Image (spheres, grey):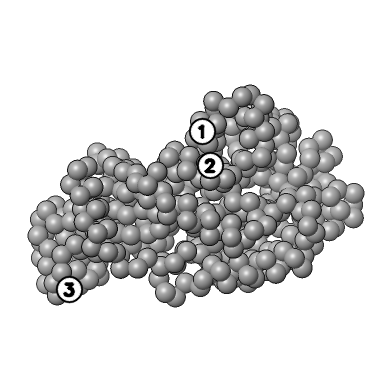
Amino acid sequence: MRKTDKPSKKWLDRIKKIAKENGTPCFIIDHEKIRQNYREFKASLPRVQAYYAVKANSNPDIVKTLYEIGASFDVASFPEFMIVYENIKNLPKKERQDFIWDKIIYANTIKQIETLRELDPYKPLVTYDNPEELKKIKEHCPHAGVVLRIRVPNTGSMVELSSKFGAHPGEAVDLILGAFKRGLVVEGISFHVGSQCTNFENYVQALQLASSIMKESASRGHKIKILDIGGGFPVKYHNKVKSFKVLAKKLNSEFKRLFPKDIEILAEPGRFMVANSSTLITKVIGKASRDGKTCYYLDDGVYHTFSGIVFDHCNYPLKAFKDGEKKVSAVFGPTCDAFDTISVGEELPDLEIGDLLYAENIGAYSIASSTYFNGFPPAKVVHINK
């Protein structure tokens, strides 16, 4: 996924027109970019089936686009499961059942009992990482295939996940044997190196751990057929981010070295598929000077599309449609909360109330965690190139 080049005048005119027609804040999703990202992923990792992590951006039209191009799906809640299911509900019953098995993995290791009961008729793949979860799955979702998630290094990732999820590798085989003793079938091993992983050695170490566990399980009479390498694939938000193609080359080499050809490999890319697909248009609604610094107030903020600043540890540089000498400014959202601070060091030209700004590469973990705090609604979503 390449860093976005400077937008063309044609593109800027187009998104300004969209904002004029729909009002602001306006969140524009370009589906052709999503398709390009999927094709790049598949070309770079031909052995891997992409299970899009719906939590990155659960917009149903994104799910539909990815389904049509061949993606599978990683869900973490029953509502996410149903977003995917809605896209295939009109298929014949047998095809729906095949789709659920082949196209969805429920990759949240901790599930409510009510959710397990709802999932059971679909015979899904579900993850686990502890004995208590196995008990729940056996009692309330006995028709599921289970996938053991192991804890692996997350060093250098933007969002660390290993403190909350994953069994210690030393406990893995016992957890596999425990599942089989309960009458469940362990279909796979999974891991996650952390979101926006820039330390590619995390993957190498994780693959080596998974390979060792699979070999030991096979020696105990239980061959595992699926390897789920999770997500974390880096988006080039800036030039210092390592290339995905470099990672893909390393992964392909490790797959060949460590895993037989009959092992099915899947991944859970979320950010990679949607980050660069979306552009936010927002409007200046207020202007003030504080301690010698110009402050701009926008109609979108950290409780809305810029929520990724808080929850995803990600920054989205703001750009103006107008030219002019830039100076360091502070930028705030519209809510009556000082926490609603987008940036205290944004370089912007002199702006007036009513001027528009835009932010690129904002498709992942942004509107996904947007709220109605203070009564302000999320940005309006507009789709192009569907």
Residue in view at x 51 percent, y 30 percent: 86
Residue tagged by mark 3?
Answer: 326
Amino acid, disc 1:
Asn
Residue tagged by mark 1?
Answer: 87
Instruction: Please identify the quarter of the rendering in which residue 322 is found.
Output: bottom left
Mark whose residue sits in front, 3 or 1 = 1
Q: How many marks?
A: 3
Q: Is residue 18 above or below residue 156?
A: above
Q: Distance between the residues labelled 1 and 2?
A: 8 Å
Q: In this rendering, would 370 be left or right of 134? A: left
Residue 67 is labelled as: 2
Q: Can residue 82 be seen in this view?
A: no
Q: Do the residues labelled 3 and 2 touch (CB within 8 Å)?
A: no
Q: Is mark 2 on a helix, strand or loop?
A: helix
Q: In this view, does 153 lie above or below 217?
A: below
Residue in view at x 57 percent, y 45 percent: 70
Q: Can residue 278 be seen in this view?
A: yes
Residue in view at x 29 percent, y 53 percent: 280
Please rate how many residues cluster around mark 1, counting C-alpha atoms within 10 Å: few if below 14, some from 14 to 19, many from 20.
Answer: some
Q: Distance between the residues labelled 3 and 1?
A: 46 Å
User: Front-most of 220 and 282?
Assistant: 282
Amino acid, disc 2:
Tyr
Please rate how many residues cluster around mark 2, counting C-alpha atoms within 10 Å: few if below 14, some from 14 to 19, many from 20.
Answer: some
